[in-house]
Amino acid sequence: MFGYNGESSAAVPPLFALSLITRVSLGQSEYWFATIKVVLAILFIIVGLIYDWGGVRHHSGPGLENFHNGQAIIGGFSALNGVELVSLAASESAKPHRAIPRAVRATFVRIVLFHILTILTIDLCID
C-alpha cells in the first residue's frame, strides 16, 4: 500500500521546473492549485449531497438510511490533527492579539466546511 507510486511522481518535474523559473511563478501556481482544490471539494460536497438526496435519475439516494444502519460516520477524523499550528503561525504576526482569534475562527469554519461536510457526504453516499 505504501511505497513508490509512479503516477504521483509525474507531478514532480513540472513543479520543479516552475520553482526554477521564478518564485512568483511557483507562488502563482500554488495559488491556482489551491483554488482548484477548494473548488473541487465544494463541487464534491454539492454533487454528493445531490446524489444522497435522490437527485440522480433511476436511482433513489440512500438518504439517512446509513444513520439507522449504524454505517455513518465511520472515520476520517484523524485529518483534523495539527490545527494548533494555526495559532503558532498567527502568533508570529505583527498584531497577534487580532490575528490569533481571526485565524482560529477561520480554521474552525474551514474544518466544518471541508472536513466535516466531506466526511458526512462520503458516509451518507455509502450504500
Image (cartoon, grey):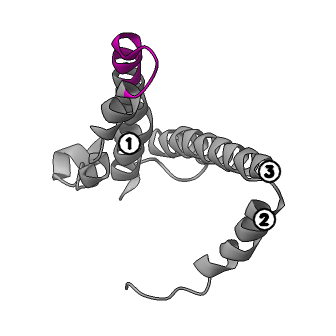
Image quadrant in which the N terminus is located: bottom left
User: In this orientation, which residue lies closer to the viewer: 37 or 73?
Assistant: 37
Secondary structure of the residue carrying numbered label 2: helix
Q: Residue at x 68, y 43 (%)?
A: 31
Q: Nearer the viewer, residue 73 or 76?
A: 76
Q: Residues within 10 Å of mark 2 (few under 14, many from 20)?
A: few
Q: Do tag 1 and tag 2 residues touch (Cβ < 8 Å)?
A: no
Label 1, residues with CA under 10 Å away: few <14, some 14-19, many ≥20: some
Tell me the kind of residue under disc 1: His
Foreground mark, 1 or 2?
A: 2
For residue 43, side relative to residue 73 (left or right): right
Task: Say whether residue 12 is left or right of residue 20.
Answer: left
Q: Amino acid at mark 2?
A: Leu
- Dot 3 falls on a residue whose secondary structure is helix
Viewer-side label of 3, 1: 3
Q: Main secondary structure of the magenta part?
A: helix
Q: CA distance from mark 1 to mark 2?
A: 34 Å
SS for callout 1:
helix
Amino acid bearing label 3: Ser
Q: Bounds of the magenta span?
A: 92-103
The residue singled out by tag 1 in the image is 115
Q: Position of residue 70 (x, y in %)?
A: 16, 52
Whole-percent x, y for residue 68 in the image: 18, 45
Sequence-wise first label, 3 or 1: 3
In the rendered structure, which disc, 1 or 2, sits on the residue that comes first in sequence?
Answer: 2
Between the residue at mark 3 and the residue at mark 2, the CA separation in whole angstroms equals 9 Å
Residue 25 got which mark? 3
